[in-house]
Every structure is written in C-alpha cells, then in structure tokens.
Image (cartoon, rainbow, N blue to C red):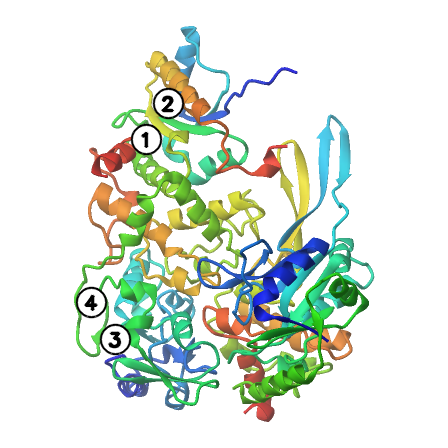
Amino acid sequence: MQKITLESLVEKAVSLLENGTVTSVLGWKKGEFDYDITPAVFESADELKKDFVWNDFCGANFSKYLVSKTCKSEGKILVFLKPCDTYSFNQLLTEHRFDREKVYAVGIPCEGMADINKVKEVVGDGISKIESNGDDLVVTTIYEDAPVKVTCKDVLAERCVNCKSKRHVAYDELLGEEGEVIASERFDEVERLEKMTPEERFAFWQNELSKCIRCNACRDVCPACTCEKCVFDNPNSGVENKAASNSFEEKMFHIIRAFHVAGRCTDCGECSRVCPQNIPLHLLNRKFIKDINEFYGEYQAGAEVGLRAPLVDYTLEDLEPGEVFDRRDNNA
Amino acid sequence: MRKCLVEDINSVLAQINKAAKVYLPVDGTDGKARFEEWAEGKEWSNALNTERSAKDFFFPQTENLMEFKTEGKNIEIIDIRSDKDDFVIFGVRGCDVRSFDILDRVFLVEPIDSFYKARREHGIIISVACGRPSETCFCGAFGIDASNPAGDVTVWRTKEAVYWQSNTDKGEELLKKVEGLTDCDEAAVEEEKAKIKKIMDKLPLANLSTEDFGAGKTMELFDSDKWKDLSESCLGCGTCTFVCPTCQCYDIKEFNAGKGVVRFRCWDSCMYSDFTQMSAGQPRLSQLERFRQRFMHKLVYYPERNDGIYGCVGCGRCLAKCPISMNIVKVMKSLGGKDNE
Amino acid sequence: MQIKEYKPLIVAFCCNWCSYAGADLAGNNRLNYPAEVKIIRVPCSCRVNPMFILRAFQRGADGVIICGCHPGDCHYTSGNYYTRRRMALLFSMLDFLGIERERTRVEWVSAAEGAKFATTMNDFVEKVASLGENKRLEDLRCKR
C-alpha cells in the first residue's frame, strides 16, 4: 500500500501544469488490468484526471526517459521519482546525459512495488481486479467468487524486498515524508553463490543464461545503458549478434552488459524486473557492486552528482588482480 | 475418442516417446513452464502456457544454414541439412497451434523454406484444451476455440482423466501405437468444452473486436495520430517479437570461425534499430515507425495477403512480458474506435 | 595411432613499452618459453577491453595473460592502474560465473625483466595445461 495518494499526485501535476512551471508530465498510465501500467507523457489536466495512475505496480523507473524527453523539447517536464529512481537520475546527470534545466523532479515516497508474478503464484491466473486495502492487495479473479487477500509484503518485487534506500537523493520538491538509507541484505544471494563450488556456480549460470532470448530488454531499460549505439548492435564491432548462437555468446553478452555498467549501476533492479525469462540479472550487477565495495571502499553510484566512478579512478595501493582470490579464500 | 487416467499420463507419454521423441511443457527452477524433452520423472506442467512459444520447434531462434571451408583459392560449400526423425510436441495450446498455420503461409509458399518444411513434416502436434485461461488470453478474437484446439491429436485434461482425440491420419497412427488408452464416449469432453466456453465468455478481453482491422485498412490506420502516444515509451527491445508465436522475421548472417565460415539465420525484431538495414540505411528511422510496423503487419498487412487471417493468435505473451506493458490489445482498443470501447 | 599431446593455447597481451620489450629481451638472452604463447602487442595494458579477453577464449585460447609496466612506470602515467582495477573486477566476475580462475592472469613485466617474462610464461602455461582444455568459455564453431 502506497502512503501517498493518487489524488495528491494528480493535484500536484495539474497545478504545475496550470501555473506554467512545466509543459508536460511523465507519469504512469492506466492499462487494461490493474497491473499493466505504461509510462506516458501527459499534457493536459483532463488526460491526467482520466488516465494517470499510482498504485503498487508503478515500478517503471522514469530517469532514462529524460534522456530523450529533454533532448528536443522546449518546455520543462515534470517527473515523479521514487527513491531508487533518484539515484539513476543523479547518475545520468553525472554523465551529462540530460538537461537538468528542463526537468522538474518531484520526489515521492515508495513503500515497495508488488511483483505481479508473485501475486499470480498466490492467486493464480484470471485476475480481473486488484485493489489496495491497507497492507493488503484484494485480488478478484474470474475463477473464485470471493476476492483473495494478499499481504503486500509477501508479494514485493525482489528489488523492493532488498530496498537499499527510502531516501531521495535528488528532487526539486518532495511530496510526503523523507525516508532513510536502509542497511539491506541485498548481497546475501551473491554471497550464497560465492560459497558454492565453481562447478555449482557454472551450472547455476548455465541454467539461468540459457533461458536468455536476447530481447535486449535488460539493456534497453537500464538507466546506465545509454550508448547511442551498443557494441552488440554495431555490425563493425565484430561481436554484433542478434541472437546468441551458443552458450558462449549468452555469457559474453551478459558479462559485457554487467561490466559496462559496473561502478555506474545504481542497483535499481530494472533489468531483473523486465526480463521476460526471469533471469536474476541483478546478481551480476550486485556482484560488481559488492566487489567494488570490498576492494575499493563503499561506493553507491548516484548518491551524489559528480561522484567519480570507481572504474575511472585508482589509488596507488589498489589490490592486484591476483590477490582477489587469495583475499576471498582467507576470508572464507 | 480415447481416454486414460491422469495418473497414467506418464506411462502413456513413455509409449509415445518410443514411437517418436516427445517434448512437453515442464516447470523449470523458476516455476515457469518451458518445452523440454520427455524423460522418466519429467512432469507435465500445470501452467497455462510456456514462457517461449512453440514456434521454436519449426523455426528455431538460431539455425545454421550452410558452411564454407576455404583452402588456398578453393572454397567448399557444405550442405549441413540432414535427415530428421519424427517428433511429438505435446501440450500445445490452441493459440500456438494456430500460429503454425500462420508461419506455414510464410515459409511454405514459393520459395519454400526447406529447413522449415523438413521440421514441419516430421512434427506431430498434440494440442490441449485450456481449462484455466488467463486474463491476458484473447484467442477468441481471432476465431480460435480454446475448448477444441486443432493439431494432429487433441487432448482434454479433467480432474480424473485425460481424453485423446485424433484429428489427422498422422495422429491416428500415433495413438494406435499406444496401449493403455481405452475407448470412451464424448460426454465428458462435451461437458468440459461447455465449461471452457463459459469461462472464455467471462474473460476480460472476451469482447475484443477486430472489426476495424484487416485487409484494406492501411490508409485509414497508417497515419493515425494515435501511434505517437502508443509508441511514446516503447524501449525498442525485442521482447514482444521474441515471445510471439507468429513473428517470423529473421536475419541471415555469417560467422567467421577462423577455419571456415558458418552461414546462419537468427530471429530478428522489427523493433530493433538495425532491422532490415540496407546500404542506404534503415527504412524506419524512428521508434514510432518501427512500432507501427509491427502492429500494422499483424493486423493489416498480413490479413491483406492471407485471406483475411490475422497475424496474431491472442496468446497473451506480449501482454504479460512487455517491460512497459504496451501491447497489441492496447493498440487495438486505441485504434479500434467505438467497437473496442 | 599416436595420441597428440595436449598443448594449451595462450594469448598474451603485452604492453608495447615494457612487457613486449621484456619478451624481446627474453628472446635475445635465449631464454626458453613455450611456443604456445601467442603475443599480441598493445599500446598499453589498459588498451585491453574485457571483450578482447572473452573473444580470445571464444577463438580457442585456453588461457589469457595481460602484461604491462609495473605500477608507477606506465608510459602514459596511469594506464596500468586502470588495468589493475578492471581486471580485478573482471576476473572476479569470471570466477563468479564458474570459470576457472587460473585461466586468467595479470603480470607486471618491465623491459629489463626478460627472465621474469620467461618464468612467468613457463609457469602460466604449466598451470593452464594442468587445467586442460577451455570448456566453459568455448565456442564450438571455432573448434572444428
């Protein structure tokens, strides 16, 4: 259940549109069901009142849209940012990827977003309605006469279970209350994998990555992946491929994708959210984050504008690549 | 009409497997169903449908076409096509069965695609009726009867029994080889069909109309100003095209393996910026054009060239999978005018 | 029939200013190192993109070693410091995916260290040979 109401967001958006602060609003648009929400640009109060939506399924991170939306527009755009989105926002600003002057950012608190797959694991298919009621979601299906109650906490998306921060690190205006950075247990799963034998880890990733259909959704949604032309789309790069022909190409794509955003990934979790094959892609990114924290000191991408990313930085005393494993073996 | 008990399904599949290799939907470690080769201990998934469509069996994501070997100034061309064995795809839903017809109309017209044809001839399809369709299902809009799907054999699963009905000679041949199926009347199946029809009518997308689409609608729909809003937040990923059972575009590429060259084809997506790239560049420069192409192809161009048959089967995978939840239903409702309000 | 002895294929990326000259010195001094080591000269160890390493494995390498100037001695002042961070993270990631950690290595070899170059290569080839063929990062199309 979100603490901030739909009405207050619409009211804010309408007033900013009407007083001329912004000319358009980037927000969530109602879908066919109560969970299939599409990011959309609203340009009038009528549109906002009719189609704007804010509920437990508004997971999409809007930060990356600012790259294209501020590129050619004249006026200012209003964007609603959840705490995790603000980290991506800062990271993009650090890399000069959008025009801050053309954005009016409103921070909104988030109680964690629900994962429709988890809801379906509980109630099954055939969902006709999902309503929010206190700490519960009330789900009506075409198969059961009575609606089923599901506790929001039980169906939170993975990234929200391991939420790293409820604090906004960037905004022009904040609605609702500010939260705090949370000591999350997000690295537990990475640690579990590290403790496996190499053979087990290999089998684990072979199984996961073999599901990949190379739709590139993980890359295209990623707020850190903003190259004009990706190396995997460039026929002159020598590694361009539209589909992985074998397990090597599956691994190469995912290693390079994760490596390219290492030190810039804010751990927003969009990659895993959008993966149509449910591959836990965030684990690759978190592995890099965990290593960076251990080797070069705690670093949170996007915590501030202008931070120097660990991979474009160095100290004279850095760890030698050969020492990485000695260190881990000694700790284990 | 034949039947077996639900608990005997594995022994029946084992017998079919002796006649031809069986593939069936099996739950993976993530709890989602995918087609896997049958083996002792593999359980038929209860899931409504597989994560990937069944088109992979006939039109795999990547496929080698030929090889070249070079030695000095000589180049040798190697035909790598080989004889195929029969195989059975068990548990295909009505929507995916229809998708094979749609692919046939692309690959089996002149010039016939021999790779596709060989697979198609050796594949035996056992379809299954949908006892519990999802809210994302809309096969009814395209005239598909989920209670009585096509295929060489059709199967109905009830609580106690599994009913088998052969629709083709190929199917009948196969069922004849299976012991342990007993003859029965059609009462139970008729009852199941009626039950499914009732559910289909209750689905939220049951009344989706195709009235405003089809042959001859190009000029009317192409320049609609609604495409801008619809494609506004499209990421340009290929999720919809790659989970789609009817998307059939591919690219042919070469891989230089050092000692030789492999020519292969792989699925391509009209959502990609390098789709149908030519020396002059790419014909569709904006995501709006690419987005429009996909839906116009399914709803207008395809029916125009194929006796009014739509290029969508309503399986609902793109509804469930699109990262931004933009899909063909939203497009149809937005462009479809009053019929879809 | 005689069974062909397994010999690993090693790709060594060597920086132009130190390690490549080190390899040269090893040769001038008639120091032995295995012929299976194929050297690719790069302007600086930091020119080595992770993609190069993966592609070397794809094309049939069983081990990849990167050699550069000692930290502090980079011809471009700081290139090898970046290499150090990148490769530490990349190797850790390869290990995370279950790929044998002994197949990759970074070694600092100066232009004066011909002997070090030879012993490093001898040692690395021996280690990789004991692991056998690279199976986990292979591309079957390149094996024919």
For badge 2, the amino acid type reads: Trp
Q: Residue A239: percent from the left, percent from the top?
A: 54, 44
**Residue under numbered circle 2:** C17
Mark earlier in primary sequence (4, 3): 3
> What's the residue type where badge 1 is placed?
Tyr
Nearest to the eye among marks 1 and 4: give it: 4
Q: Give the farthest residue toward the top.
A: C30
Residue A203 point in image, percent of width and height: 44, 45
Q: Which quadrant holds residue B267?
A: bottom right
Amino acid carrying mark 3 in the image: Ile
Horizontal relation, residue A11 to residue C121: left or right = left
Residue farthest to the right, as pictured: B110
In terms of depth relative to the viewer, which is nearer, A208 or B45?
B45
Mark 1 neighbour class, 10 Å CA radius: few under 14, some 14 to 19, many 20 or more: few
For badge 4, the amino acid type reads: Arg
Q: Which residue is mark 3?
A: A108
| Mark 1–mark 4 distance (CA, rounded to whole Å) | 41 Å
**Residue at label 1?**
C76
**Looking at the picture, does residue B211 appear above or below residue A312?**
below
Question: Could you say whether the residue bearing mark 3 is in a helix, strand or loop?
Answer: loop
Quadrant, the N terminus of chain A: bottom left
Discs 1, 3: same chain: no
The Cα atoms of the two marked residues, 2 and 4, are separated by 49 Å
| Looking at the image, residue A199 lies above or below residue C106 | below
Visible residue check, residue B56: no
Precedes in sequence: disc 1 or disc 2 = 2
